[in-house]
């Protein structure tokens, strides 16, 4: 394919088992996630590119190297809280030296923190995808000192990097307003094999509303969704609310709060599930509500649209309006007010024509903008521009 690509990012080793030579079962459990990055790497491998990954994991004490015909994975230890005191110095050193010792032609780092700084300090041409707004995160998270350190790390990286892209129009605007940078946007991809080609049928019976979130925080805003659902049940008593993700299981934070406040009627606290299990639940649900106050992208929205499940998101929630094509592919409401969320839910679930419209336009939105071949083509074009111009 002409050039070899390095990726410096959190990843999930299990996603690459088919590209590794006899991987150890324990090694397959390593990794910190990076769902969008995993998809990008798989897309590059499917296109025949040689890829080498540089990543971190807190569960190991010594570095681990895995390999296959077209893939290498270098995993280094990630320390505990002490890593923040020296701003990831040891981790960045591991990553940078490994990048320098590789025979890759370009290094693509994801997020604008330790992984990006390692790529920036290496001697390889680099591309950095900015995936969040460090300023907004600093404002909304409680661990202020740690977030302040990452905010300064983010600022250093962005001010010194040569090649930057954003994963949404919202992040592009953040980079323009904060750093006066005009960057390209390459969105998170979705596997085009998971798109439902069949038109979904409007359900006249019991309707399930699903919401997928990581953490029961103020930023995720699920408390207001639960309150809104309490009002929805007054008019649509057959509805159920399915909550998926960390802190949303039985006897976890979300259920504890809902029971205490008397808002748990009709709510299923499902908790953590694999990505395939989440997609299965979404595909059988009648509506996805994403109440987050701020998103740099919003993967649950994409995963709902590919299954033909209509979506509701926040009109002022970062990248959410952009992902939903500014209301054409999903309903936008003011998620800071439960009454607006409730009105939006009732509007979609009680009108067959509106429900089918959002189902159909959501699928087309993903096909036009977010399927893997489209996104990989954009990345390859960017790599070539960096390497050959």
Image (cartoon, grey):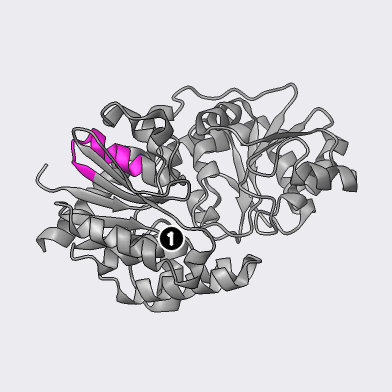
The quadrant of the rendering that contains the C terminus is bottom left
Give the position of the N terminus as an image quadrant: top left
Looking at the image, residue 204 lies above or below residue 192: above
Image position, residue 254 (x, y; %): 76, 45
Q: Residue at x 24, y 51 (%)?
A: 6
Foreground residue among 215 and 43: 215
Which residue position is annotated with label 1?
A: 169
Q: Is residue 78 left or right of residue 290?
A: left
- Figure check: 130 above or below 239: below
Where disc 1 sits, the SS reads: helix
Whether residue 329 appears in this view of the structure is no
Q: Which residues are magenta?
A: 39-51
Residue at image coords 52%, 49%? 298
Q: Is residue 110 magenta?
A: no
Q: Can you tell which quarter of the image residue 287 is in?
A: top right
Question: Residue 111 occupies which quadrant of the picture?
Answer: bottom left
């Amino acid at each position: 394919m002409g050039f070899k690509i390095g990726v410096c990012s959190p990843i999930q080793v299990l996603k690459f088992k088919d590209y590794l030579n006899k991987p150890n079962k324990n090694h397959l459990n390593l990794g910190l996630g990076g769902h969008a990055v995993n998809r990008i790497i798989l897309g590059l491998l499917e296109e025949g590119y040689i890829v080498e990954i540089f990543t971190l994991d807190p569960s190991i004490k010594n570095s681990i190297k895995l390999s296959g015909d077209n893939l290498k994975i270098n995993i280094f230890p990630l320390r505990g809280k002490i890593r923040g005191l020296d701003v990831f110095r040891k981790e960045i050193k591991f990553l940078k030296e490994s990048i320098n010792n590789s025979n890759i032609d370009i290094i693509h780092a994801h997020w604008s923190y330790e992984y990006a700084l390692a790529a920036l300090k290496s001697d390889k041409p680099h591309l950095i995808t900015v995936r969040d707004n460090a300023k907004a995160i600093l404002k909304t998270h409680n661990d202020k000192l740690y977030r302040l350190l990452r905010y300064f790390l983010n600022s250093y990286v962005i001010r010194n990097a040569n090649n930057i892209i954003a994963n949404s129009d919202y992040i592009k605007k953040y980079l323009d307003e904060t750093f006066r940078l005009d960057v390209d946007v390459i969105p998170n991809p979705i596997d085009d094999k998971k798109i439902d080609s069949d038109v979904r049928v409007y359900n006249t019976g019991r309707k399930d509303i699903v919401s997928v979130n990581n953490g029961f925080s103020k930023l995720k805003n699920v408390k207001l969704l639960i309150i809104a659902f309490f009002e929805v049940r007054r008019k649509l008593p057959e509805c159920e609310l399915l909550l998926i993700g960390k802190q949303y299981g039985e006897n976890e934070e979300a259920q504890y709060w809902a029971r205490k406040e008397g808002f748990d009627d009709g709510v299923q606290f499902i908790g953590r599930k694999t990505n395939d299990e989440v997609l299965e639940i979404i595909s059988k649900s009648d509506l996805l509500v994403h109440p987050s106050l701020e998103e740099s992208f919003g993967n649950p929205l994409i995963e709902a649209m590919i299954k033909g499940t209509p979506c509701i998101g926040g009109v002022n929630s970062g990248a959410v309006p952009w992902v939903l094509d500014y209301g054409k592919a999903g309903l936008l409401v003011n998620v800071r007010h439960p009454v607006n969320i409730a009105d939006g839910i009732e509007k979609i679930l009680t009108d067959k024509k509106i429900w089918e419209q959002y189902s159909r336009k959501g699928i087309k939105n993903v096909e036009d903008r977010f399927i893997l071949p489209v996104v990989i083509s954009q990345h390859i074009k960017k790599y070539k521009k960096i390497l050959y111009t």
